[in-house]
Amino acid sequence: SFNESWETEASIEANPRGALLVWDRPKPGRQYVLAAAVARGKQMNPDSTTERPKLDYSAAYVLDMAPAHDTGRPVYRTVAAWHGRVDADRFGAILNHIGRWYNTAWVCPEANLYGVTTIQRLLALGYPQVFLKTLFDKPTAFPIGQPPTANAMEYGWRTGNNGVPKYVMTSQLNRMMRDGHIDIPDPGFWDEALVFERLPDGKIEARSGCHDDRIMALA
């Protein structure tokens, strides 16, 4: 968990009720990637008249990018995870602190909808390593923190019609899990995997009323 002044000055403290799970603390000289999916404010039970609205979650994973050489193949280890409901800008502050703790990890946030707000907060806090990609086929819709002439660059990653299809992302993750190329110790991830399915219309997503935030963060 974070201390009281966490938005600008934070220390990470042990808390059994905290949203950050840590399996391996940062090691000097190691390179980490912090991948994040930003909650879209989607109401999970819009037709219910007896339950309070259940909004989706934001999720993030820290991956140690140093391959395990003893296996003869690259195995990327999940060393930390964050999961919770929080405003998009505050999620940016959380990613800032976690990323700096993990040797200024490369932060790869989702850029759909509210993800733009998360990215704006990261940049406002001066985070130096936010994933930035070049768009060769179209101008950038949100040139965050860029000069007007740099309209072929975009921070973060997109899914859906304007980005990478969900089935491509999840197929790649499935391949890595199947072939033993990634270690995922988070029980919450596997809970989501049990209800992540292909629907009759061909879409790939969580079963109705369930979540896939952790899966999309890691994919």
Image (spheres, rainbow, N blue to C red):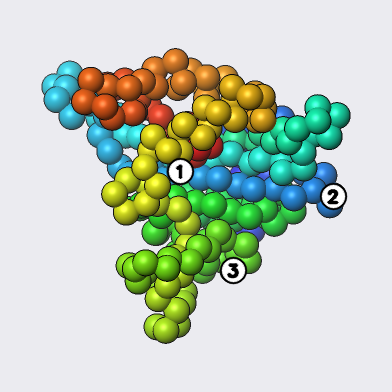
Asked if the residue at tag 2 contacts the one at tag 3, i.e. Cβ–Cβ closer than 8 Å, the answer is no
Q: Which amino acid, by three-letter code, is at mark 2?
A: Pro
> What residue appears at the point 77 percent right and 42 percent down from the top-left corner?
66
- In this figure, which residue is indicated by the disc labeled 3? 126
User: Disc 1 residue type?
Assistant: Ala
Q: Residue 60: horizontal and vertical position, in percent? A: 54, 41
Residue 37 against residue 195 in the figure, above or below: below
What secondary structure is marked by label 3?
loop
Q: Which residue is depicted at the point 40% across and 83% down?
A: 148
Which kind of residue does numbered mark 3 sit on?
Gly
In front here: 53 or 184?
Answer: 184
Residue at x 25%, y 34% (from the top left corner): 43
Numbered disc 1: secondary structure: strand
Please tell me how crowded label 2 is: few (under 14), some (14-19), or many (20+) other residues with Cα within 10 Å. few
Q: Nearer the viewer, residue 40 or 170?
A: 170
Is 44 situated left or right of 92 in this image? left
Horizontal arrangement in the rendering, residue 109 relative to residue 113 (left or right): right
Residue at x-position 38% and y-position 27%: 211
Q: Are marks 1 and 2 in contact (CB under 8 Å)?
A: no
- Residue 35 horizontal side relative to residue 75, left or right: left
Give the labeled residue for mark 2. Answer: 28
**Disc 1 vs disc 3: Cβ atoms closer than 8 Å?**
no
Which residue is labeled 1 in the image?
Answer: 37
Label 2 SS: loop
For label 3, the crowd category at 10 Å Cα-Cα, with few meaning under 14, some 14 to 19 and many 20 or more, is few
Residue 183 in view here: yes
Mark 1 or mark 3: whose residue is earlier in sequence: 1
